[in-house]
Image (spheres, rainbow, N blue to C red):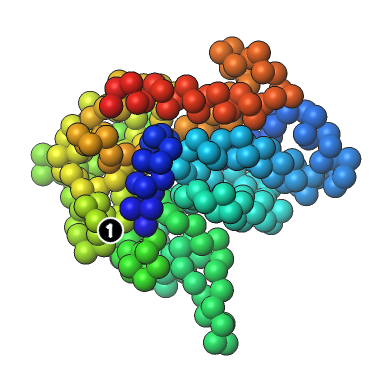
Amino acid sequence: MIQNLIRKIQETKAPICVGLDPMINYIPDALLRRSYREFGENLEGVADAVWNFNKEIIDHTYDLVPAYKPQIAMYEQFGIEGLKVYEKTVRYCQEKDRIVIGDAKRGDIGSTSAAYATAHLGRLKVRGRTYKAFHTEFVTVNPYLGTDGVKPFVDVCKAEDAGIFVLVKTSNPSSGEFQDRLIDGRPLYEEVARKVVEWGSDCKDGRYSNVGAVVGATYPEIFVTMRKLMPDTYFLVPGYGAQGGTAKDLKACFNEDGLGAVVNSSRGIIAAYRQEKYERFGAEHFAEASRQAVIDMAADINSVL
């Protein structure tokens, strides 16, 4: 599966992932009013507005980017109606021939972990018939429970030619409370990085493994170390733009061939129309603003590769 992502990155010349993380205050009032008139001022109405918001952004950007990353919590907050929109969004991205990274950060043990893996990456057999649930190409995984929590995902990756991105060093300010703690003189995130290589050693797809790593753009000082520890691991890099990460910071994430990482931006793209830089588009043309934000981000990243 990682080769599919690489191929689309090369086709678009944009190592970019658009984070589809809609909040109510990101959605223009006109979209909300239209959905409320049809479905009411309730969870169903909000979910419909989210769907229309996502669809417009996808329609205006899919030819520019290889992948989308919907954060499932942003849909779960609207209950079952929100999860329906999550599934609908995943399917729509796939109809546009784009890769979907389900940002679910799942992690448990035994049958629970296997169930998460089946839900997001695999297939379920019911009386001789096979069904897919969310069936994204990739999903993010929390490794805190160790191999017991990750192996079920790796097993499904092998069976389905799917992939995972394991949290190694996240972009949030308090990540260091645990991830930077020294274990035998080394930060914990380095130990996780070594396990990522181990978990992915027999899950290769060409040079790179289908077991990738989440490495935040807000800590560029560790990129050189991360790349040395994980030379054949693809990085999913959050934290660009709104969280402070810059293109210059990202250079060490990539290998000499310009591959090795896909950079995520969420509100910096989907809520671009609210930024001073793109305010000329206005709320009415929010999707056009998102398109321009993608173009600018791609130019920015490619300028340092």
**Residue 299 in the figure: left or right of residue 227:** right
Q: In the image, is residue 283 above or below residue 85?
A: above
Secondary structure type for disc 1? strand
Q: Nearer the viewer, residue 231 or 109?
A: 231
**Residue 76 in the figure: left or right of residue 170:** right
Q: Nearer the viewer, residue 259 or 269?
A: 259
- Identify the residue shown where x is 41% and y is 45%: 8
Is any atom of residue 178 visible in this view? no
**Residue 215 in the figure: left or right of residue 172:** left
**Residue 277 x %, y %:** 56, 13
Q: Quadrant of residue 59?
A: top right
Q: Residue furthest front?
A: 11
Q: Residue furthest right?
A: 37
- Identify the residue shown where x is 42% and y is 27%: 298
- Identify the residue shown where x is 51% and y is 62%: 135
Q: Quadrant of the C terminus?
A: top left
* Residue designated by label 1: 205
At label 1, the amino acid type is Asp
Q: Nearer the viewer, residue 171 or 162?
A: 162
Q: In the image, is residue 93 above or below residue 18?
A: below
Q: Quadrant of residue 23?
A: top right
**Residue 200 x %, y %:** 24, 58
